[in-house]
Image (tube, rainbow, N blue to C red):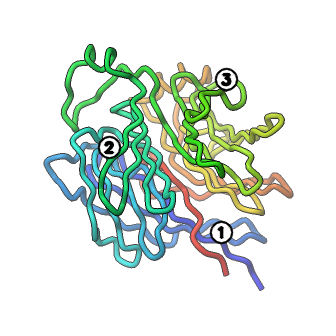
Amino acid sequence: MTKVLRFLVSGGDFHRTDGCLSFVDLDVESGLLTLKREIWIEHPRPELAVQGKGITGLCLDKDTAWVCFSNLIARVRLSDGVIIDIIENICYNDMHQMALCGSDLLVANTGNESVDTVSLQSRTVDRLDFLGDDLRALRKSHSQVEITEPHVHHISSVARNADGDVIVGLGRQARILNATRWSWIGPRMHAPIHDVQLDCHGAIWCTTVDGAVHRIDQRVESWQVYGTRGSAGWTRGLALCDEGMLVGMTAIRESNRDYYCMLTRSDVSQADACLVWKPFSTGVSTFVEFPGGGSRKIFTVCQLTQQ
């Protein structure tokens, strides 16, 4: 019987203010990726919608998903994309990766330079401030729709390990920090880090935006992932499976090309958004492009169910 893996992908479009949830199937034997359907979801607070941000963080909760717009958390029903709950906070700005940890949401509040633990029961926020009082006092005030750069850390990702330690991906430093134990995990990477995850064996995985996936345990093992034009797009979004990994790539276009080339020390003229399946057994990658791929964004990739 053919084994099919199903995935949910968050993202958007540089030209739009709404976000997108994409449903993708993978035939494991052939490596065929199929984009089954997409749901475009309007920002529930139109006055806070920011063009090009879309949906960033994503985590599954039964038949729903918690998603991050850039400045708001929403719970979405997967059957039809209807928003059934909203969590708001005046300090939410440019939020990135999110993880469901029991009855808490752990959120990389990137624009605020903090890691936020949101209680789903009390709706309170426990905030780990990466700036501290002195630096925060020097930084000018921003609204939730304003860019807060320069970022000292650019917190891109957050997770918890089996001991409950908070594991943080720092984009500017290209490092992974165990914030609970205040210790580095692994070496400094050669490009900004995204998508920090832990597998069932306790190893830590991450993407770097230049098209690499890394596994950090006693040593570092790395894979290079290529997109549709023989080079990498802006790489973020990672789903780990027994058979391989599904990796997301956001479009590289004129407006972000110079910045990407500076970060990665590469020479890329254009790349369309796509998902790349890289099996562990053969290493032969397959991919699926997204409609309007020249301006599409991919952010988070989660595995759904298999049959």
Residue 11: where, in percent of width, then height?
42, 53
Q: Quadrant of residue 38?
A: bottom left
Q: Which residue is mark 1?
A: 26
Q: Which mark is residue 52?
A: 2
Please, is residue 217 above or below residue 161 in the view?
A: above
From the image, which quarter does the N terminus lie in? bottom right
Q: Earlier in the sequence, mark 1 or mark 2?
A: 1
Please, is residue 139 above or below residue 249 in the view?
A: above
Left or right, 28 with reference to 83: right
Q: Amino acid at mark 3?
A: Arg
**Element at badge 2?**
loop
Whole-number angstrom distance, CA of label 3 to CA of label 2: 30 Å
Q: Residues within 10 Å of mark 3 (few under 14, many from 20)?
A: few
**Element at badge 3?**
loop
Q: Earlier in the sequence, mark 3 or mark 2?
A: 2
Q: Residue at x 73, y 57 (%)?
A: 200
Q: Residue at x 35, y 68 (%)?
A: 76
Q: Earlier in the sequence, mark 3 or mark 1?
A: 1
Please, is residue 260 above or below residue 243 in the view?
A: above
Q: Residue at x 51, y 57 (%)?
A: 101
Q: Residue at x 39, y 78 (%)?
A: 79
Q: Which residue is mark 3?
A: 188
